[in-house]
Protein backbone atom coordinates (compact mmCIF):
# COMPACT_ATOMS: atom_id res chain seq x y z
CA UNK A 1 0.00 0.00 0.00
CA UNK A 2 1.21 3.49 -0.88
CA UNK A 3 -0.10 6.88 0.21
CA UNK A 4 1.12 10.29 -0.93
CA UNK A 5 0.07 13.48 0.88
CA UNK A 6 0.70 17.07 -0.20
CA UNK A 7 -0.11 19.86 2.24
CA UNK A 8 -0.18 23.61 1.65
CA UNK A 9 -0.44 26.15 4.44
CA UNK A 10 -1.19 29.87 4.21
CA UNK A 11 -2.63 32.71 6.30
CA UNK A 12 -1.50 35.77 8.23
CA UNK A 13 -1.29 33.94 11.57
CA UNK A 14 1.19 31.29 10.39
CA UNK A 15 4.70 31.35 11.83
CA UNK A 16 7.10 33.19 9.50
CA UNK A 17 9.67 30.35 9.45
CA UNK A 18 7.21 27.68 8.23
CA UNK A 19 7.44 26.51 4.64
CA UNK A 20 4.22 26.72 2.61
CA UNK A 21 4.42 23.12 1.31
CA UNK A 22 5.05 19.71 2.84
CA UNK A 23 5.15 16.24 1.28
CA UNK A 24 4.73 12.80 2.85
CA UNK A 25 5.01 9.33 1.30
CA UNK A 26 3.94 6.31 3.33
CA UNK A 27 4.31 2.73 2.16
CA UNK A 28 3.64 -0.67 3.75
CA UNK A 29 4.47 -4.16 2.53
CA UNK A 30 2.97 -7.41 3.83
CA UNK A 31 5.72 -9.90 3.01
CA UNK A 32 3.78 -12.93 4.32
CA UNK A 33 1.46 -13.89 7.19
CA UNK A 34 4.23 -13.18 9.72
CA UNK A 35 6.40 -10.33 8.45
CA UNK A 36 5.54 -6.78 7.42
CA UNK A 37 7.53 -3.66 6.57
CA UNK A 38 6.72 0.04 6.50
CA UNK A 39 8.54 3.20 5.46
CA UNK A 40 7.65 6.88 5.67
CA UNK A 41 9.57 9.83 4.27
CA UNK A 42 8.49 13.45 4.75
CA UNK A 43 9.93 16.67 3.36
CA UNK A 44 9.12 20.33 3.97
CA UNK A 45 11.07 21.45 0.84
CA UNK A 46 14.23 21.90 2.99
CA UNK A 47 14.47 19.11 5.59
CA UNK A 48 13.67 15.39 5.74
CA UNK A 49 12.19 12.98 8.25
CA UNK A 50 12.53 9.19 7.87
CA UNK A 51 10.79 6.32 9.70
CA UNK A 52 11.40 2.62 8.91
CA UNK A 53 9.35 -0.08 10.66
CA UNK A 54 9.38 -3.89 10.69
CA UNK A 55 6.66 -6.07 12.26
CA UNK A 56 6.75 -9.74 13.29
CA UNK A 57 3.27 -11.14 13.94
CA UNK A 58 2.37 -14.56 15.34
CA UNK A 59 -0.42 -15.91 17.54
CA UNK A 60 1.37 -15.54 20.87
CA UNK A 61 4.16 -13.13 19.94
CA UNK A 62 4.02 -9.73 18.25
CA UNK A 63 7.21 -7.71 17.87
CA UNK A 64 8.09 -4.51 16.03
CA UNK A 65 11.15 -2.35 15.46
CA UNK A 66 11.01 1.28 14.37
CA UNK A 67 14.00 3.37 13.34
CA UNK A 68 13.65 7.14 12.99
CA UNK A 69 15.81 10.03 11.83
CA UNK A 70 14.02 13.38 12.07
CA UNK A 71 16.01 16.51 11.32
CA UNK A 72 16.16 18.97 14.21
CA UNK A 73 14.88 21.77 11.95
CA UNK A 74 12.12 19.70 10.35
CA UNK A 75 8.62 21.22 10.62
CA UNK A 76 5.34 20.63 8.85
CA UNK A 77 2.99 23.34 7.53
CA UNK A 78 1.53 23.86 11.02
CA UNK A 79 4.62 23.89 13.21
CA UNK A 80 6.89 21.53 15.14
CA UNK A 81 6.39 17.77 15.02
CA UNK A 82 6.62 15.01 17.61
CA UNK A 83 10.07 13.41 18.13
CA UNK A 84 11.66 16.33 16.29
CA UNK A 85 15.46 16.12 16.26
CA UNK A 86 15.53 12.50 17.42
CA UNK A 87 17.66 9.71 15.92
CA UNK A 88 17.07 6.23 17.28
CA UNK A 89 14.94 3.13 17.52
CA UNK A 90 11.77 1.96 19.26
CA UNK A 91 11.34 -1.76 19.99
CA UNK A 92 8.04 -3.28 21.15
CA UNK A 93 7.29 -6.89 22.14
CA UNK A 94 3.96 -8.36 23.22
CA UNK A 95 4.00 -12.00 24.37
CA UNK A 96 1.07 -14.11 25.63
CA UNK A 97 2.34 -17.63 26.43
CA UNK A 98 -1.08 -18.60 27.83
CA UNK A 99 -4.59 -17.16 27.77
CA UNK A 100 -4.15 -15.97 31.36
CA UNK A 101 -0.66 -14.45 31.10
CA UNK A 102 0.38 -11.47 28.98
CA UNK A 103 3.59 -9.44 28.88
CA UNK A 104 4.55 -6.23 27.04
CA UNK A 105 7.93 -4.55 26.69
CA UNK A 106 8.85 -1.26 25.04
CA UNK A 107 12.38 0.13 24.69
CA UNK A 108 13.10 3.52 23.10
CA UNK A 109 16.79 4.37 22.52
CA UNK A 110 17.53 7.68 20.83
CA UNK A 111 19.81 10.67 20.49
CA UNK A 112 18.50 14.21 21.04
CA UNK A 113 20.05 16.62 18.51
CA UNK A 114 18.10 19.71 19.66
CA UNK A 115 19.12 19.84 23.34
CA UNK A 116 21.97 17.32 23.70
CA UNK A 117 24.05 16.86 26.85
CA UNK A 118 26.72 19.55 27.16
CA UNK A 119 29.49 17.11 28.12
CA UNK A 120 28.71 14.60 25.33
CA UNK A 121 26.35 15.53 22.49
CA UNK A 122 26.23 11.91 21.16
CA UNK A 123 25.13 10.25 24.42
CA UNK A 124 21.89 8.26 24.09
CA UNK A 125 18.66 8.38 26.09
CA UNK A 126 16.76 5.23 27.07
CA UNK A 127 13.08 4.81 27.97
CA UNK A 128 12.06 1.29 29.08
CA UNK A 129 8.57 0.12 29.95
CA UNK A 130 7.75 -3.45 30.98
CA UNK A 131 4.47 -4.84 32.24
CA UNK A 132 2.79 -8.18 32.78
CA UNK A 133 -0.68 -9.21 33.90
CA UNK A 134 -1.96 -12.56 35.08
CA UNK A 135 -5.52 -13.78 35.56
CA UNK A 136 -5.52 -15.64 38.87
CA UNK A 137 -9.21 -16.50 38.48
CA UNK A 138 -12.19 -14.98 36.62
CA UNK A 139 -12.51 -12.29 39.32
CA UNK A 140 -8.86 -11.55 40.14
CA UNK A 141 -5.98 -10.04 38.14
CA UNK A 142 -2.39 -9.37 39.21
CA UNK A 143 0.07 -6.97 37.53
CA UNK A 144 3.80 -6.27 37.64
CA UNK A 145 5.48 -3.26 36.04
CA UNK A 146 8.81 -1.48 35.70
CA UNK A 147 9.54 1.88 34.06
CA UNK A 148 12.94 3.48 33.47
CA UNK A 149 13.68 6.94 32.06
CA UNK A 150 17.43 7.30 31.67
CA UNK A 151 17.68 10.79 30.18
CA UNK A 152 21.46 11.34 30.24
CA UNK A 153 21.72 12.52 26.64
CA UNK A 154 19.90 15.80 27.20
CA UNK A 155 20.79 19.15 28.76
CA UNK A 156 18.64 18.39 31.80
CA UNK A 157 19.92 14.97 32.89
CA UNK A 158 17.96 12.67 35.17
CA UNK A 159 17.23 9.00 35.85
CA UNK A 160 13.76 7.93 37.05
CA UNK A 161 12.73 4.40 38.01
CA UNK A 162 9.31 3.04 39.01
CA UNK A 163 8.65 -0.61 39.94
CA UNK A 164 5.17 -1.72 40.91
CA UNK A 165 2.88 -4.60 41.77
CA UNK A 166 -0.91 -4.53 41.84
CA UNK A 167 -4.04 -6.62 42.13
CA UNK A 168 -7.69 -6.10 41.22
CA UNK A 169 -10.53 -8.23 42.53
CA UNK A 170 -14.30 -8.24 42.19
CA UNK A 171 -16.11 -9.33 45.36
CA UNK A 172 -19.53 -10.82 44.71
CA UNK A 173 -21.36 -10.30 47.97
CA UNK A 174 -24.77 -8.63 48.17
CA UNK A 175 -23.54 -6.67 45.13
CA UNK A 176 -20.43 -6.62 42.95
CA UNK A 177 -17.61 -4.63 44.60
CA UNK A 178 -14.64 -3.75 42.39
CA UNK A 179 -11.43 -3.26 44.36
CA UNK A 180 -7.77 -2.58 43.60
CA UNK A 181 -4.47 -2.22 45.48
CA UNK A 182 -1.06 -1.15 44.10
CA UNK A 183 2.41 -0.68 45.53
CA UNK A 184 5.22 1.28 43.79
CA UNK A 185 8.89 1.95 44.54
CA UNK A 186 9.99 5.21 42.89
CA UNK A 187 13.46 6.73 42.62
CA UNK A 188 14.48 10.00 40.94
CA UNK A 189 18.09 11.09 40.44
CA UNK A 190 18.49 14.53 38.83
CA UNK A 191 22.11 15.18 37.79
CA UNK A 192 21.37 18.77 36.77
CA UNK A 193 19.37 19.66 39.90
CA UNK A 194 20.26 17.46 42.92
CA UNK A 195 17.61 19.17 45.05
CA UNK A 196 15.03 17.21 43.04
CA UNK A 197 16.42 13.78 44.08
CA UNK A 198 13.98 11.59 46.02
CA UNK A 199 12.93 8.05 46.95
CA UNK A 200 9.26 7.28 47.42
CA UNK A 201 7.28 4.23 48.51
CA UNK A 202 3.73 4.62 47.20
CA UNK A 203 0.58 2.66 48.03
CA UNK A 204 -2.82 3.16 46.40
CA UNK A 205 -6.07 1.31 46.97
CA UNK A 206 -9.74 1.81 46.27
CA UNK A 207 -13.17 0.35 45.69
CA UNK A 208 -16.31 1.07 43.70
CA UNK A 209 -19.79 -0.46 43.80
CA UNK A 210 -23.37 0.28 42.91
CA UNK A 211 -25.60 1.57 45.69
CA UNK A 212 -28.82 1.62 43.67
CA UNK A 213 -28.82 0.83 39.95
CA UNK A 214 -26.74 3.59 38.30
CA UNK A 215 -25.75 5.31 41.57
CA UNK A 216 -22.20 4.34 42.53
CA UNK A 217 -20.03 4.88 45.59
CA UNK A 218 -16.25 5.14 45.31
CA UNK A 219 -13.29 5.45 47.68
CA UNK A 220 -9.60 5.93 46.75
CA UNK A 221 -6.58 6.14 49.07
CA UNK A 222 -3.06 7.35 48.14
CA UNK A 223 -0.25 6.97 50.70
CA UNK A 224 3.45 7.92 50.23
CA UNK A 225 6.59 7.41 52.30
CA UNK A 226 8.76 10.15 50.81
CA UNK A 227 12.47 10.90 51.35
CA UNK A 228 14.12 14.00 49.86
CA UNK A 229 17.69 12.81 49.23
CA UNK A 230 19.52 16.13 49.32
CA UNK A 231 18.38 17.00 52.87
CA UNK A 232 17.50 13.55 54.16
CA UNK A 233 14.06 14.81 55.20
CA UNK A 234 11.18 12.33 55.38
CA UNK A 235 7.50 13.08 54.97
CA UNK A 236 4.35 11.05 54.46
CA UNK A 237 2.06 12.90 52.04
CA UNK A 238 -1.25 11.09 51.77
CA UNK A 239 -4.74 11.70 50.51
CA UNK A 240 -8.10 10.05 50.15
CA UNK A 241 -11.09 10.80 47.97
CA UNK A 242 -14.63 9.52 48.39
CA UNK A 243 -18.01 10.26 46.94
CA UNK A 244 -20.96 9.15 44.86
CA UNK A 245 -21.75 9.53 41.17
CA UNK A 246 -24.73 8.85 38.93
CA UNK A 247 -25.37 8.93 35.22
CA UNK A 248 -28.53 7.88 33.41
CA UNK A 249 -31.99 8.70 32.08
CA UNK A 250 -34.93 10.01 34.05
CA UNK A 251 -37.20 7.10 33.16
CA UNK A 252 -36.98 4.53 30.37
CA UNK A 253 -38.73 6.68 27.75
CA UNK A 254 -37.76 10.13 29.02
CA UNK A 255 -35.69 12.48 26.80
CA UNK A 256 -34.00 13.89 29.92
CA UNK A 257 -30.53 12.73 30.97
CA UNK A 258 -28.48 13.57 34.02
CA UNK A 259 -24.97 13.28 35.43
CA UNK A 260 -24.25 13.95 39.10
CA UNK A 261 -21.06 13.66 41.15
CA UNK A 262 -20.31 14.62 44.75
CA UNK A 263 -16.77 14.09 46.05
CA UNK A 264 -14.64 15.00 49.03
CA UNK A 265 -10.82 15.01 48.93
CA UNK A 266 -8.49 15.40 51.87
CA UNK A 267 -4.71 15.83 51.48
CA UNK A 268 -2.35 15.73 54.45
CA UNK A 269 1.37 16.36 55.10
CA UNK A 270 1.96 18.06 51.73
CA UNK A 271 4.31 20.86 52.85
CA UNK A 272 7.40 19.27 51.25
CA UNK A 273 8.69 21.08 48.14
CA UNK A 274 8.61 17.78 46.23
CA UNK A 275 5.21 16.64 47.48
CA UNK A 276 3.13 14.80 44.90
CA UNK A 277 0.01 16.71 45.91
CA UNK A 278 -1.12 20.31 45.56
CA UNK A 279 -2.03 20.45 49.26
CA UNK A 280 -5.66 21.32 48.52
CA UNK A 281 -8.64 19.86 50.36
CA UNK A 282 -11.99 20.35 48.72
CA UNK A 283 -15.62 19.40 48.36
CA UNK A 284 -16.82 19.30 44.78
CA UNK A 285 -20.27 19.08 43.26
CA UNK A 286 -20.93 18.51 39.58
CA UNK A 287 -24.36 18.44 37.94
CA UNK A 288 -25.26 18.10 34.28
CA UNK A 289 -28.73 18.02 32.72
CA UNK A 290 -29.49 17.35 29.07
CA UNK A 291 -32.65 17.32 27.00
CA UNK A 292 -32.40 15.04 23.95
CA UNK A 293 -35.76 14.72 22.21
CA UNK A 294 -34.08 13.17 19.16
CA UNK A 295 -30.67 12.13 17.94
CA UNK A 296 -30.17 15.41 16.08
CA UNK A 297 -31.11 17.79 18.92
CA UNK A 298 -29.76 18.47 22.38
CA UNK A 299 -29.96 21.24 24.96
CA UNK A 300 -27.62 20.88 27.93
CA UNK A 301 -26.38 22.70 30.97
CA UNK A 302 -23.78 21.84 33.61
CA UNK A 303 -22.33 23.37 36.72
CA UNK A 304 -19.31 22.61 38.89
CA UNK A 305 -18.73 24.07 42.36
CA UNK A 306 -15.58 23.49 44.41
CA UNK A 307 -14.87 24.73 47.94
CA UNK A 308 -11.10 24.60 48.56
CA UNK A 309 -9.23 24.83 51.84
CA UNK A 310 -6.23 23.11 53.48
CA UNK A 311 -3.87 22.96 56.45
CA UNK A 312 -1.01 23.74 54.05
CA UNK A 313 -0.19 27.50 54.43
CA UNK A 314 0.78 27.69 50.74
CA UNK A 315 -2.80 26.93 49.65
CA UNK A 316 -5.20 29.80 49.06
CA UNK A 317 -8.66 29.19 50.45
CA UNK A 318 -11.21 29.92 47.78
CA UNK A 319 -14.39 28.86 46.04
CA UNK A 320 -14.60 28.08 42.35
CA UNK A 321 -17.69 27.76 40.18
CA UNK A 322 -18.01 26.93 36.50
CA UNK A 323 -21.17 26.93 34.42
CA UNK A 324 -21.65 25.72 30.86
CA UNK A 325 -24.73 25.69 28.65
CA UNK A 326 -25.33 25.03 25.01
CA UNK A 327 -27.37 23.40 22.33
CA UNK A 328 -26.70 21.16 19.35
CA UNK A 329 -28.79 20.73 16.25
CA UNK A 330 -28.16 18.88 13.00
CA UNK A 331 -30.13 19.36 9.81
CA UNK A 332 -30.12 17.85 6.35
CA UNK A 333 -28.68 20.13 3.65
CA UNK A 334 -30.09 17.92 0.92
CA UNK A 335 -26.59 17.20 -0.39
CA UNK A 336 -25.67 13.52 -0.11
CA UNK A 337 -22.01 12.65 0.36
CA UNK A 338 -20.84 9.29 1.62
CA UNK A 339 -17.47 8.93 3.28
CA UNK A 340 -14.96 6.27 2.29
CA UNK A 341 -13.05 4.76 5.19
CA UNK A 342 -11.71 1.60 6.76
CA UNK A 343 -13.23 -0.65 9.43
CA UNK A 344 -11.02 -3.00 11.40
CA UNK A 345 -10.92 -4.69 14.78
CA UNK A 346 -10.47 -7.91 16.71
CA UNK A 347 -12.55 -10.91 17.68
CA UNK A 348 -11.06 -11.96 21.01
CA UNK A 349 -11.50 -13.90 24.23
CA UNK A 350 -12.69 -11.18 26.65
CA UNK A 351 -11.25 -12.58 29.88
CA UNK A 352 -12.63 -9.88 32.20
CA UNK A 353 -15.77 -9.34 30.09
CA UNK A 354 -15.33 -5.55 29.93
CA UNK A 355 -15.61 -5.27 26.13
CA UNK A 356 -12.05 -3.88 25.75
CA UNK A 357 -9.23 -5.63 23.87
CA UNK A 358 -6.39 -5.74 26.36
CA UNK A 359 -2.94 -7.29 26.51
CA UNK A 360 -3.17 -11.01 27.28
CA UNK A 361 -6.63 -11.39 25.75
CA UNK A 362 -6.03 -13.71 22.82
CA UNK A 363 -7.62 -13.17 19.42
CA UNK A 364 -9.65 -15.93 17.76
CA UNK A 365 -8.86 -16.93 14.19
CA UNK A 366 -11.10 -18.22 11.39
CA UNK A 367 -14.22 -16.23 12.34
CA UNK A 368 -16.13 -14.63 9.47
CA UNK A 369 -17.53 -11.10 9.60
CA UNK A 370 -19.76 -9.26 7.16
CA UNK A 371 -19.82 -5.56 6.27
CA UNK A 372 -23.44 -5.08 5.20
CA UNK A 373 -24.14 -8.06 2.92
CA UNK A 374 -21.59 -7.47 0.19
CA UNK A 375 -18.19 -7.78 1.86
CA UNK A 376 -16.82 -10.49 4.13
CA UNK A 377 -13.57 -10.86 6.01
CA UNK A 378 -12.08 -13.65 8.13
CA UNK A 379 -9.98 -13.10 11.26
CA UNK A 380 -6.28 -13.96 11.03
CA UNK A 381 -4.11 -15.73 13.61
CA UNK A 382 -4.36 -12.71 15.95
CA UNK A 383 -8.13 -12.41 15.63
CA UNK A 384 -7.76 -9.31 13.43
CA UNK A 385 -10.05 -8.43 10.52
CA UNK A 386 -10.23 -5.48 8.14
CA UNK A 387 -12.61 -3.93 5.60
CA UNK A 388 -11.08 -1.33 3.26
CA UNK A 389 -12.79 1.31 1.10
CA UNK A 390 -16.12 1.13 2.92
CA UNK A 391 -18.36 3.75 1.30
CA UNK A 392 -21.26 4.72 3.55
CA UNK A 393 -22.57 7.33 5.95
CA UNK A 394 -23.20 4.55 8.44
CA UNK A 395 -21.89 0.99 8.17
CA UNK A 396 -22.85 -2.22 9.92
CA UNK A 397 -20.52 -5.11 10.73
CA UNK A 398 -21.97 -8.49 11.72
CA UNK A 399 -20.27 -11.58 13.06
CA UNK A 400 -21.21 -14.93 11.51
CA UNK A 401 -22.29 -16.86 14.59
CA UNK A 402 -21.92 -20.18 12.77
CA UNK A 403 -18.14 -19.65 12.73
CA UNK A 404 -17.82 -18.98 16.48
CA UNK A 405 -15.86 -21.87 18.08
CA UNK A 406 -17.72 -24.33 20.25
CA UNK A 407 -17.82 -23.31 23.90
CA UNK A 408 -17.71 -19.56 23.26
CA UNK A 409 -20.52 -17.09 23.85
CA UNK A 410 -20.81 -13.65 22.23
CA UNK A 411 -20.74 -10.74 24.72
CA UNK A 412 -21.27 -7.91 22.22
CA UNK A 413 -24.20 -7.44 19.82
CA UNK A 414 -24.14 -9.65 16.72
CA UNK A 415 -24.36 -6.51 14.55
CA UNK A 416 -22.67 -3.20 15.38
CA UNK A 417 -23.23 0.11 13.58
CA UNK A 418 -20.68 2.92 13.22
CA UNK A 419 -20.51 6.34 11.55
CA UNK A 420 -17.93 6.59 8.80
CA UNK A 421 -15.51 9.49 8.34
CA UNK A 422 -13.60 10.25 5.17
CA UNK A 423 -10.21 8.54 5.13
CA UNK A 424 -10.46 7.48 8.78
CA UNK A 425 -10.10 4.07 10.41
CA UNK A 426 -13.01 2.98 12.62
CA UNK A 427 -12.48 0.15 15.09
CA UNK A 428 -15.15 -2.41 16.04
CA UNK A 429 -14.28 -5.25 18.40
CA UNK A 430 -16.29 -8.39 19.17
CA UNK A 431 -15.70 -9.91 22.60
CA UNK A 432 -16.37 -13.59 23.30
CA UNK A 433 -16.26 -15.52 26.52
CA UNK A 434 -15.56 -19.18 26.99
CA UNK A 435 -17.42 -19.42 30.24
CA UNK A 436 -19.01 -22.83 30.48
CA UNK A 437 -22.72 -23.58 30.27
CA UNK A 438 -25.11 -26.11 31.77
CA UNK A 439 -28.32 -26.40 29.80
CA UNK A 440 -31.07 -28.84 29.00
CA UNK A 441 -34.81 -29.38 28.91
CA UNK A 442 -37.57 -30.43 31.29
CA UNK A 443 -40.09 -32.52 29.33
CA UNK A 444 -42.90 -35.05 29.52
CA UNK A 445 -41.36 -38.33 28.40
CA UNK A 446 -44.27 -39.49 26.21
CA UNK A 447 -42.47 -42.47 24.64
CA UNK A 448 -40.78 -43.51 27.93
CA UNK A 449 -37.26 -43.68 26.44
CA UNK A 450 -35.66 -41.10 28.74
CA UNK A 451 -34.59 -38.86 25.84
CA UNK A 452 -36.05 -35.57 24.62
CA UNK A 453 -37.48 -36.52 21.24
CA UNK A 454 -39.98 -35.28 18.66
CA UNK A 455 -43.03 -36.78 20.36
CA UNK A 456 -42.10 -35.45 23.80
CA UNK A 457 -43.57 -32.26 25.27
CA UNK A 458 -41.44 -29.47 26.84
CA UNK A 459 -42.81 -28.14 30.13
CA UNK A 460 -42.84 -24.36 30.63
CA UNK A 461 -42.32 -22.51 33.94
CA UNK A 462 -40.29 -25.14 35.81
CA UNK A 463 -37.62 -23.62 38.08
CA UNK A 464 -34.10 -25.03 38.47
CA UNK A 465 -31.38 -23.67 40.74
CA UNK A 466 -27.63 -23.84 41.35
CA UNK A 467 -25.88 -24.30 44.66
CA UNK A 468 -25.34 -20.52 44.97
CA UNK A 469 -29.06 -19.75 44.62
CA UNK A 470 -28.98 -18.77 40.93
CA UNK A 471 -32.27 -19.78 39.28
CA UNK A 472 -33.43 -20.45 35.74
CA UNK A 473 -36.98 -20.99 34.47
CA UNK A 474 -37.82 -23.16 31.48
CA UNK A 475 -39.22 -21.40 28.40
CA UNK A 476 -42.15 -22.42 26.20
CA UNK A 477 -40.13 -25.34 24.79
CA UNK A 478 -39.05 -26.54 28.25
CA UNK A 479 -35.45 -25.40 27.85
CA UNK A 480 -33.19 -23.69 30.42
CA UNK A 481 -29.51 -22.71 30.72
CA UNK A 482 -26.92 -21.54 33.27
CA UNK A 483 -23.64 -19.73 32.56
CA UNK A 484 -21.23 -21.11 35.16
CA UNK A 485 -17.64 -20.75 36.32
CA UNK A 486 -15.08 -23.54 36.28
CA UNK A 487 -15.47 -25.96 39.20
CA UNK A 488 -18.12 -28.07 40.92
CA UNK A 489 -21.82 -27.24 40.52
CA UNK A 490 -25.13 -28.86 41.46
CA UNK A 491 -28.35 -28.38 39.46
CA UNK A 492 -31.55 -28.88 41.48
CA UNK A 493 -35.11 -29.23 40.21
CA UNK A 494 -37.42 -27.12 42.41
CA UNK A 495 -40.30 -29.51 43.06
CA UNK A 496 -42.67 -26.75 44.19
CA UNK A 497 -42.53 -25.27 40.69
CA UNK A 498 -43.68 -28.55 39.13
CA UNK A 499 -47.33 -29.18 38.34
CA UNK A 500 -49.01 -31.79 40.56
CA UNK A 501 -49.70 -33.95 37.50
CA UNK A 502 -45.97 -34.63 36.95
CA UNK A 503 -43.24 -36.49 38.82
CA UNK A 504 -39.52 -36.49 37.86
CA UNK A 505 -38.28 -39.79 36.38
CA UNK A 506 -34.68 -39.07 37.51
CA UNK A 507 -33.06 -37.65 40.63
CA UNK A 508 -33.83 -33.97 41.24
CA UNK A 509 -30.11 -33.30 41.93
CA UNK A 510 -27.28 -33.52 39.40
CA UNK A 511 -23.59 -32.79 40.12
CA UNK A 512 -21.17 -31.44 37.49
CA UNK A 513 -17.42 -30.89 37.46
CA UNK A 514 -17.21 -28.04 34.95
CA UNK A 515 -14.22 -27.47 32.66
CA UNK A 516 -13.56 -24.12 30.99
CA UNK A 517 -15.21 -23.55 27.63
CA UNK A 518 -17.41 -26.66 27.59
CA UNK A 519 -21.19 -27.01 27.55
CA UNK A 520 -22.97 -29.64 29.62
CA UNK A 521 -26.42 -31.09 28.92
CA UNK A 522 -28.85 -32.18 31.62
CA UNK A 523 -32.35 -33.17 30.51
CA UNK A 524 -35.02 -34.05 33.10
CA UNK A 525 -37.79 -36.43 31.91
CA UNK A 526 -41.16 -36.26 33.70
CA UNK A 527 -43.90 -38.83 34.10
CA UNK A 528 -47.56 -38.04 34.47
CA UNK A 529 -49.00 -39.20 37.76
CA UNK A 530 -51.31 -42.16 37.28
CA UNK A 531 -49.26 -43.57 34.37
Image (spheres, helix red, strand yellow):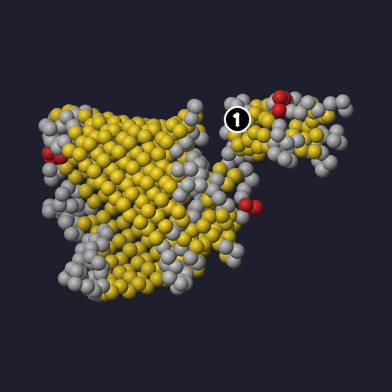
* In the depicted structure, whether residue 515 falls above or below residue 62: above
For disc 1, the marked residue is: 470
Q: In this view, does 473 lie to the left or right of 46?
A: right
Q: In this view, does 515 lie to the left or right of 273?
A: right
Nearer the observer, 529 or 181: 529
Nearer the observer, 67 or 325: 325
- Asked if residue 169 can be seen in this view, the reply is no
- Asked if residue 279 can be seen in this view, the reply is yes
Q: Which residue is drawn at 60% across and 26% down?
A: 469
Q: Residue at x 21, y 42 (%)?
A: 320
* In the depicted structure, whether residue 400 falls above or below residue 474: below
Residue 334, x across and y down, in percent: 46, 72
Mark 1, secondary structure of its residue: loop
Q: Which residue is drawn at 78% across and 32% down?
A: 525
Quadrant for the N terminus in the image: bottom left
Residue 221, x across and y down, in percent: 31, 31
The number of numbered discs placed on residues in the rendered structure image is 1
Q: Is residue 524 left or right of residue 233?
A: right
Nearer the observer, 317 or 352: 317
Which image quadrant is residue 458 in? top right
Circle 1: is it few (<14), some (14-19), or many (20+) Cα within 10 Å?
A: few
Q: Residue at x 47, y 36 (%)?
A: 213
* In the depicted structure, whether residue 211 falls above or below residue 190: above
Q: Which residue lies furthest to the right in this view?
A: 531
Which image quadrant is residue 83 in? bottom left
Residue 216, x across and y down, in percent: 41, 35
Residue 20, x across and y down, in percent: 24, 74
Q: In this view, does 171 lie to the left or right of 316?
A: right
Quadrant for the C terminus in the image: top right
Amino acid sequence: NYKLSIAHGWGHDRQADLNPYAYDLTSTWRLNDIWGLGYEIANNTERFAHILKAVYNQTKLVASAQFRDIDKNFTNVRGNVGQQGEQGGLFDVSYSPTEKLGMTTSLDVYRDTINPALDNDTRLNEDLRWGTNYQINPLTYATLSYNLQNQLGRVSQFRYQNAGIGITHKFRLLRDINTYANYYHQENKNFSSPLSDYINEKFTAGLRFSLIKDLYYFFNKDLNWFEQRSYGTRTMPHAYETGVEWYGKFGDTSPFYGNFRFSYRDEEDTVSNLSFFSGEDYIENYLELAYRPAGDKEIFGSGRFRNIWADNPNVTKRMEATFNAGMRYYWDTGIKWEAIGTIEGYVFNDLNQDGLKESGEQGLSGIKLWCAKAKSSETDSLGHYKFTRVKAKKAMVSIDTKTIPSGYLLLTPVTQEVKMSQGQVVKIHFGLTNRSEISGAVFEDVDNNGEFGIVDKGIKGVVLSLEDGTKATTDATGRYSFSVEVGGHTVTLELESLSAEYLPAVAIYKDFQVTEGLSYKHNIPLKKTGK
